[in-house]
Amino acid sequence: MRLLAGLLTAFPLAYSGYLIPKVFALLNATTPSIPQMDAFVHINALAMIPCYAALAVCLAYLYRSARVPRHRQTFWLLLLLFTSVFAMPIFWYLYIRPAEWQGNASDL
């Protein structure tokens, strides 16, 4: 489950590697065709599903787990909401990935 969450949180960052060059290619095209733009919009709409799912996993883990200290929850909430593409993989690495934990097993 932790590996799946890690892949899910890495998806937005990996997808931006596809998205940014594609946007510049479409902007530099003399006249982008309607089918190209239509496909681009549909792919982006489908890509938002795992992005929002990853954000939901991180936000749920932020408040349901005792791994994130209380005094840092607001900080991580703001980071996840405003810089989610970069913050989600870091949050996963710091708080979701570690298998060893001294708290309750129910905290996971």
Image (spheres, rainbow, N blue to C red):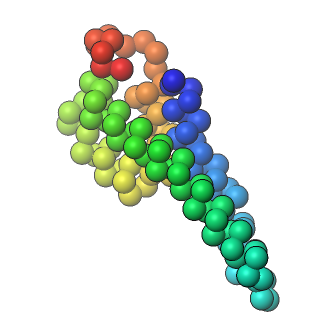
Q: Is residue 87 visible?
A: no
Q: Residue at x 55, y 39 (%)?
A: 8
Task: Estimate the x, y position of residue 70 in percent, counting from the top left.
Answer: 20, 33
Taking the image as shown, residue 87 lies to the left or right of residue 39, namely left
State the residue in front, 100 or 29: 29
Q: Is residue 13 visible?
A: yes
Q: How many marks?
A: 0
Task: Estimate the x, y position of residue 93 in percent, counting from the top left.
Answer: 49, 31
Q: Locate residue 101: give its quadrant.
A: top left
Q: Residue at x 33, y 11 (%)?
A: 105
Residue 65 lies, with reference to residue 52, above or below; the image says above
Q: Which quadrant would the C terminus be assigned to in this image? A: top left
The residue furthest bottom is: 30
State the residue in front, 42 or 66: 42
Q: Residue at x 56, y 30 (%)?
A: 4
State the residue in front, 94 or 3: 3
State the residue in front, 106 or 66: 106
Residue 106 lies, with reference to residue 19, above or below; the image says above
Q: Locate residue 63: give its quadrant.
A: top left
Q: Residue at x 40, y 28 (%)?
A: 95
Residue 85 lies, with reference to residue 42, above or below; the image says above
Task: Estimate the x, y position of residue 106 in percent, counting from the top left.
Answer: 30, 15
Task: Estimate the x, y position of residue 104 in percent, counting from the top left.
Answer: 28, 12
Residue 38 lies, with reference to residue 83, above or below; the image says below
